Image (tube, grey):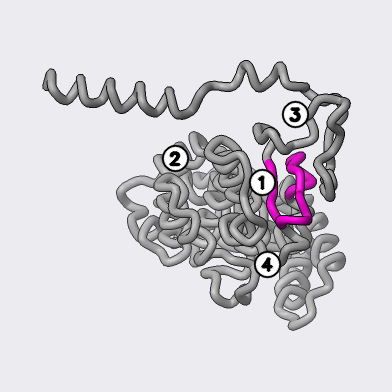
Amino acid sequence: MGSQRATELYNQLRAAVAQPDVNHQHAKSLLAQLKIELSELGLLVPDSSSLDPGALTTARDVLEIGAFESLRTDDLAGFERYLSLLATYYNDLSSTLPRSSNEAPLFALSLLRLLSQNRIAEFHTLLETLGENKADVLESGEVSWVLQLERSLMEGSYSRVWSLCRPSSSSASLPLPEFSHFTPTLLQTVRNEIAACDERAYESLPVRDARTLLFLESDQEVQEFAQSRNWYLDPSTSTLHFPSSARHPSRLAPTQGIPAGGMTTGLIGGGGGFDDDSRELDRAKVVAATLKYARELESIV
């Protein structure tokens, strides 16, 4: 790699990550030492005009191992730092070095990270960085899977999203085991989006229907989720009432109290009283007016 110490550390790192039961703490210690060596050798931010391609390839391999190790130890900040360093190798040195077999998987993981954080603009910006000479990266199984996931999200096909990355399936069904570090966050984002739509579309929902719509496994999970969103559960009917419902405790006058047999789940103090109802839109009138407008528009066209 350019120095005997760097070569010894690299060989130790390769041997450490090849073990079935990787000692991640030891691997990260070796990576920290190797980054110092790479910096001293000018390989951390390289200049292809003065460095040996073999040394560059080895240095790239070290950074790729670092990126995967960061994910496996839930160090997302470290993962982003390694991706930033690898950008020089994947972009500026793409014509100098042979293509790395890890480029497509790491690119897919970077896309999935942005998607799970709902950073859609950055997701598409990153896609634009792929030039015509990297069609194989775009067409790889890992990147294709993430793009399919993104299309399903944009189309609102949440059942498809769930089937692609549901936690009940083994990580072996994912293109990369490391995808499992981002899919739970993505599913939670999807679940919150579905819940927000339900709150606008309905005043109440049976628990069994909420369990299906929200892709939850049990009624207990539904109750815990309901509590996080300030929903009221009526145990006598197994019905969830959203804050817009007249049955929700926050909508009742102080003298009425909580509905008979009811219980609250995570209510935030301070009821709104009946005055809130007067400000609610009459949904039937809104729908009727919209349909009338549509008929008039159609007759004009």
Q: Where is residue 156 in the image (x, y as percent from the top left)?
A: 44, 48
Label 3 and label 1: CA atoms lie apart by 46 Å
Q: Residues within 10 Å of mark 3 (few under 14, many from 20)?
A: many
Q: Which residue is under mark 1?
A: 80
Q: Is 228 in the magenta?
A: yes
Residue labelled with disc 2: 124
Q: Nearer the viewer, mark 2 or mark 4?
A: 4
Please tell me whether residue 181 is drawn above or below residue 247 in the rendered image. below
Q: Which of marks 1 and 2 is nearer the N terminus?
A: 1
Residue 54 coordinates in the image, percent (x, y): 55, 63
Which quadrant does the N terminus fall into?
Answer: bottom right
User: In terms of secondary structure, where does tag 2 sit?
Assistant: helix
Identity of the amino acid at label 3?
Arg
- Residue 180 seen in this snapshot: yes
Residue 275 locus on image (x, y percent)? 71, 16
Q: Residues within 10 Å of mark 4 (few under 14, many from 20)?
A: few
Residue 251 - label: 3
Q: Quick one: 150 or 161, which is closer to the camera?
A: 161
Residue that carries the numbered disc 4 in the rendered image: 217
Calculate the distance from the C-alpha at mark 2 to the C-alpha at mark 4.
33 Å
